[in-house]
Image: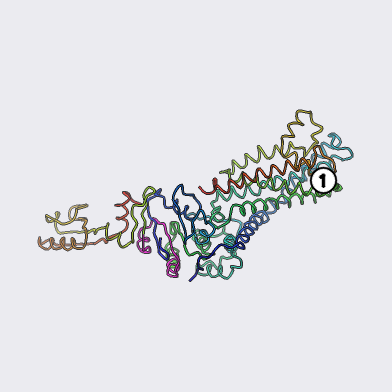
Amino acid sequence: MEQGEFFGLLGPNGAGKTTLINIIAGLARATSGSVSVMGADVAADYRRARRMLGVVPQELVFDPFFTVRETLRLQSGYFGIRGNDAWIDEVMAHLDLAAKADVNMRALSGGMKRRVLVAQALVHKPPVIVLDEPTAGVDVELRQGLWQFVRRLNRDGHTVVLTTHYLEEAELHCSRIAMLKAGRIAALDSTRNLLDSFSGLELRLRLDRESLPQPFPGQLLFSDRSFFRVKLQDYRQLEDALARLRESGVQIQEMELQPPDLEEVFVRLTGRGT
Amino acid sequence: MLFEKSKPYQGVEAVTSFRTLLYKETLRFWKVSVQTVAAPVLTALLYLVVFSHALRGRVPVYDGVPYTDFLVPGLVMMSVLQNAFANSSSSLVQSKITGNIVFVLLPPISYLEFFGAYVLASMARGLVVGSGVLLATLWFVELRLQAPLWAIGFALLGAALLGTLGLVAGIVSDKIDQMAAFQNFVIMPLTFLSGVFYSIHSLPPVWQKLSHANPFFYMIDGFRYGFFGVADFSPAASLAVVGASFLGVSLLALSLLKSGYKLRH
């Protein structure tokens, strides 16, 4: 992964996304091959590698003995940083945690706990930030806030690695995507290329009759009386389809065009849904 | 930029991470001191009151040493050992179950620092509870410390050994159940049958021999020597046994930590 990228790691459950993240973070050990973070091998030079990495785990884990501030101070200490209070205060402000700074972790809501996890990943100012399903089960407001914050970090130069099931989010934020299937890479390319190369357009039509003029371009996916769903390869084929309809004098009562999306790429490549 | 450029890891940072982990593990038991310190002190006092009342004058111990006096060092040491074990073992198992173990596995903490922090924190708890018990028993007996250095030495080494054993148990156990089983079926019987409540020279020969196979015996016996200048076994030899055990268990703990057994898959 390139420095400064916003990288997406996608795949169905069991594909190996979390395992890969665990290997990068040192929580699991690879049986073969090697991984390095900012030039430091995660096994041989683990101290430097881990110092460069901030990981936000998927589960809402916390230590019930401590407050938010104590948690962040401890985390700073683990990374060898003393006197980090100024930065801790800043991170808490960015994540809207300042009001809860001296509240015990146990007493926080799920959304708050997640924000603390993000703060914990940032106390040591790592150049690489890994987020494992950051918006799973998160309400809309917090989701927007989180994405805004993460995008800002990316703009500031942090490399962001993301795993998610929410393909629309991956499509929106990630510049490059790897799709995993059963522990192997099914695709690795920029988001743009993936969308361009694999997906097509879906045309939904309600006509004034119960059959499409033949021959009709593309592939008919579904029909129900006067409603049709047609798969088209590209916008050229769309033009052909519309031309065909005009030639046949068919009246279009309703039309909807579904643009290329990652979900389709995903299904195509991995053979099943998310 | 929010971050600093990649730079080599410095020694001072390693000290800070070790100190932070030690601080956290110590704070953890201190925050709930009613449960972790006051309760064991009370339990030890109850043993003292009940057993001394029941067995005083009936169980021969050492010449010139009343039973109640004899009982005190055994109870102090028992508290030290059990609480040192409990600190590291319960901390690790709970962390693994709740999942917050990742907070100490993600940072660049070396396995040596990890070991040191958990063992020292366990020693702290063991010694704090032991001191508490000792102070509380002053109410009942007059303190006699014939060879205080021996007592301190055994207390430190014993706490270290049990803290390390707790670390191993915490790594290996996946559930609180397994932890409790080890504590109730191994640690407790061994401590109770190590000569805390009786002197082993009053046992039939077969049982005496078996007691010698109990590692806890050497710690209790040696610690008690510090009080009365009398022991069932040579204190120097006892110290050697305990020291060798500590070395063995430490090597085991360090190799488990280094290999990432059950912590890093």
Where is residue B14? Give x, y as percent.
60, 60
> At x 60% / y 49%, what residue is drawn?
B92
Which amino acid type is shown beneath numbered disc 1? Gly
Q: Which residues are magenta?
A: A149-176
> What chain letter is assigned to the residue under label 1?
B
Q: Secondary structure at mark 1?
A: helix
Quadrant of the frame with the N terminus of chain A: bottom left
| Residue A155 forms part of the magenta stretch | yes
Please state which of residues A46 and B48 is positioned toward the viewer in this rendering.
A46
Q: Is residue B87 left or right of residue A56?
A: right
Please state which of residues A202 and B118 is positioned toward the viewer in this rendering.
B118
Q: How dense is the environment of label 1, judged by Cα within 10 Å: few (below 14), some, or many (20 and up)?
A: many
Where is residue A74? Give x, y as percent.
60, 61
Where is residue A197? Give x, y as percent.
27, 58
Q: Quadrant of residue A6?
A: bottom left
Please state which of residues B35 and A3 is positioned toward the viewer in this rendering.
A3
Circle 1 residue: B226
